[in-house]
Every structure is written in C-alpha cells, then in structure tokens.
Image: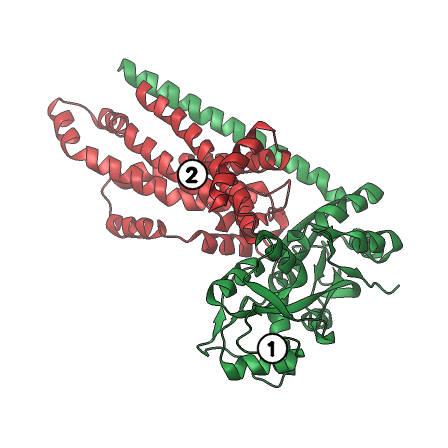
Amino acid sequence: MDFIQDGFIQALALLLNGDAATYSAISTTLRASGLAMAASLLLGIPLGYLLGYFDFRLKRQIRIIVDTLLSLPTVFIGLVIYALLTRNGPLGEAGLLFTIPGIAIGQAILALPIIIALTATAVEAADHNLRITLVSLGANRKQIAVSTLWEVRLGILAAAVTATGRVLTEVGISLMVGGNIKWHTRTITTAIALETSKGEFGMGIALGLVLLLIALTVNISLAGLRRRI
Amino acid sequence: MDRKVKLIKIVSLLVFSITVLSAANFFAAQDSNAAAEEETLLMATTTSTDNTGLLDYLMPFFTEKTGIDMRWISTGTGKALKLGQNCDVDVLLVHAPQAEIAFVDKGFGIERREIMYNDFVLIGPAEDPAGIRGKNVAEALQAIRSSQNIFVSRGDESGTHKMEQALWNSANVTTPEQEHWYRQSGQGMLATINVAGELKGYTLTDRGTYIKYESSAEGKPPLVILVQGDAVLLNQYSIILVEPKHCPSVEYDKAKKLSDWLAGDEAQRLIGEFKLLGKQLFTPNASR
C-alpha cells in the first residue's frame, strides 16, 4: 500500500513543480466542465423552474423521465455522442470529435437532468406554504414567481454543486468523446485511468488528489456565495 | 426587495462571466482546431505503444522533421480499427495482422506496412502446476487445458486477445469460453497480469508489459516467464493509412509521410534504441 503514501507526495510534487502535463489536464478538465456547466445551468434552471412551478398535463410523466435520466451511465452518453459526432455521423461535419467542446456537450447532457430535477424539487418544496402566504398578502402572479425563485436559491445552488461534482469526475464521456489525447483532450480523470492501466498507481492517486483539491476550491467559492446570498 | 436586487445582480454577473469565459474558451479551442487542421495528424494506436512510452519518445523526432503535430488515441486494436473505419483518424498503428488484412480488404485502409515487432510470452506461477515450462506454445496450452489450471484472458478484443485466440486455434484446442478455469478479465494487460497473479493462474502478455510488471514487483514477481521464443509468439506492428476514397476528409499526404518516416532509416534506428528499464522492447523490421 506504499503507493497511497507515494501518491500524496507525488501530488504535491506535481503541483509545486508545475508539471506541464498535469496543468494541461487540469486546464482541459476545467474548460470542459466550465462549458458544460454554463450550458446546463442556462438551460436547466428555467426548465426545472417551469417543471416545478406550473401544473400541466404530463407533468408527472415528464418528471419520471427526468428522474430516470439521472441514471444515464456516462459511458453510454459517451457512446451516443460519439455516434453523433463521428465523421460519418449526423453531426460529423462540425469536427467536434476529440475536442473539448465535444466533451462539454456530453457532460452538459450528464448535468442537465440533475439541474432540472433538483431545481424542480426545490421549487415544489417551497411552493406549498409560500404561495398560500403570498396570495393571502395580496401578491400578484409575477411577484409570486419572483419570490419563489428567490426562496429556492439555495436549492439551485445545491443542484449546481451536485452537477459540478458529477461533471468534474466523470470519465466515460471524456474517454470516448475526447479520446484522451495528451496535451489536448486528456482530463484528470482519463489521466488517472491511463496511469492505472500502466500500473503507475502512485501517479493515479496523485492525480485523484489533485482533482479533489480542485473540487475543494470550487466548493469553497460556492460556499462563499451561499453566505452572501 | 433590496436583497433580491442584490441576488439578481450576483447571479447575472455569475452567469455573464461563466458565459464569457466559456465563449472565450470555445473560440480559443476552435482557433487551435482551425490552426491545427493544417498541421496535425491523428493516429489510433494500441495501448502497448503508448503505455511503454515508445510514442512519447519517437514522435517528437517526426514533428521536428516535418512540423506535423502528432496526436494519438491509444485503445484496443478492435476500437482503433473501428475509428479508422468511421473516418475519425487518419492513420493506424496496430498489431493484429488478420484483422488488419480484413480491414484493408473491406476498403477501409491502404498501404499496410510492417514497421516493427515485439513478442508475447506465456507467464504463470513459478511452481508451474500445469508443467508448461520450456514447452512450445501448442503443448503448453494443451497442458493448461487438460490440467484445468486457471488461465486469465484479456477478453476485450485487443490485439493480445486476438493473438491468444489464434494460439488456442493453432494448438488445435477450441478457444475456451465458459470453462470454470478460464477467466476473462475484460481489462488492460497489466490489470490482467495482476488478476492472474492473485488467482495463481497463467496468462499471455506482451514482453514490454511483463518487464514493467517484473520491475514493480522488485525482483520477486509471483508470475514468471514460462514459454517464450516460439515463432508464433511474434507480435507484428503495422501502419495502415485510412483509405481516402472511403474517407475523403483524411489527411492522406501527412499519413503517407508518417508511414515513410517510420519505415525509414532514422525511425527504424530509433525504435531499436528504445529501451524500457534497460531492455529493448521493439525490433524494427520495415521492408522498404
């Protein structure tokens, strides 16, 4: 079990010595996840809000579908996106296979159901008493909608935190759509998979710790945001 | 209402900055892709060439000479051929001769050219319960089968797995599948050796991976080489260009340059000089 200890030492060495390959993987990871999170938040928050706030036909069925999509395996998403982006596929002309935006598309599909489901749940949970209180205070529809959005801010933040965790740590999409190309589409997780298959367990542990450090940084910033709002 | 205004400000600022950052990233990536289109060559290859460090050692020489930036995806031979068939890569460096010939026959690839070889070895526990030490491959496999000792297979359609299947065939033994002693790991070579070590079983591996395994065990590996040197154990690596008639988007000219360079004197010498832990791994054998 020496390699766990080695991993800690190597992780520090990689970060402090500015190992170029590690920083390239960190940058790829952040770029892909950043793009994916931006897209999924922009799409997911309004959709989740609509799904939680309004009553309409098929609402329960749609909710079941969204909840089912929470179980989408990343390897499966990777395979489907590959099928779309391959040269002979329907979107082959875009040349997105083995690129960071290509990975981001897959990761956005991974994150979207999480954002929608958790936002909808937060809206539904807040709705009950809030709407009655607001109506009794004489609020109009627009005021009720805005107040609900305000009340569920922490729920949306929790959705973002959860989805970021999933996106940062997935390996199936990055491997299949990104191709794990050194200096270009190698993310931290695909690098861990590679080092493990090479038997470099210490290096794999080191990269895992680097990823945890990034997650820690992201969550500290989000915790700061939570306190301020 | 004051706090709501503040919230809306913070959130819009956040979304705005994320969007700007992502857009910048996106266009930066597009730019580098556009620039890259003139200069890069995408190759699909097998894990053995990448994991041993051969490509990291060899390709900078090619880039220096031609200015072509090499990118490669290392995966099992099965997937590498599929990537070529789907026009997602320009060139292949793989080791499964029969599958390669079928690939060329189907019109997906052209100009298959042998570049180098390494060899496979049969490894197993030092006490050798099936008694295969020093036998030829066919006898060894028959002995494993009749003694029903555990044999761990890659089971992943990799070049090594295809080689193993061919060896069972040439030993006049039907390839085992559900026999209780035959275990398919479905994992990479090193992981598979470790499984065999834990189970005290036999397995087939390329020599390079075994050297790495041996060195990490600090001189006392649970599994040792029992059968080697049989001519059928040679593992031929070839380069294949993806057929431009099948895939008009491929970089045929650059792929051709790579093929010529790999078969040329400089690369052949470099391949022969490449060592892992002091041992030569690949023997160059391009015929020009």
Q: Given the image, what chain letter belongs to the residue carrying mark 2? A: A
Q: Secondary structure at mark 2?
A: helix
Both labels 2 and 1 in a single chain:
no
Q: Nearer the viewer, residue B139 or A38?
A: B139
Camera-side residue of A113 and B51: B51
Q: From where the camera sits, is residue B143 visible?
A: yes
Identify the mark at residue B132; answer none if there is no mark: 1
Q: Which residue is mark 2?
A: A40
Viewer-nearest residue: B248 or B200: B200
| Picture coordinates of residue B153, whole percent (x, y) | 54, 69
- Res A203 → quadrant: top right
At label 1, the amino acid type is Ile
Marks 2 and 1, how far apart in space?
Answer: 58 Å
Where residue B84 sits, quadrant-wise, is bottom right
Display colour for chain A: red
**Hue of chain B?**
green
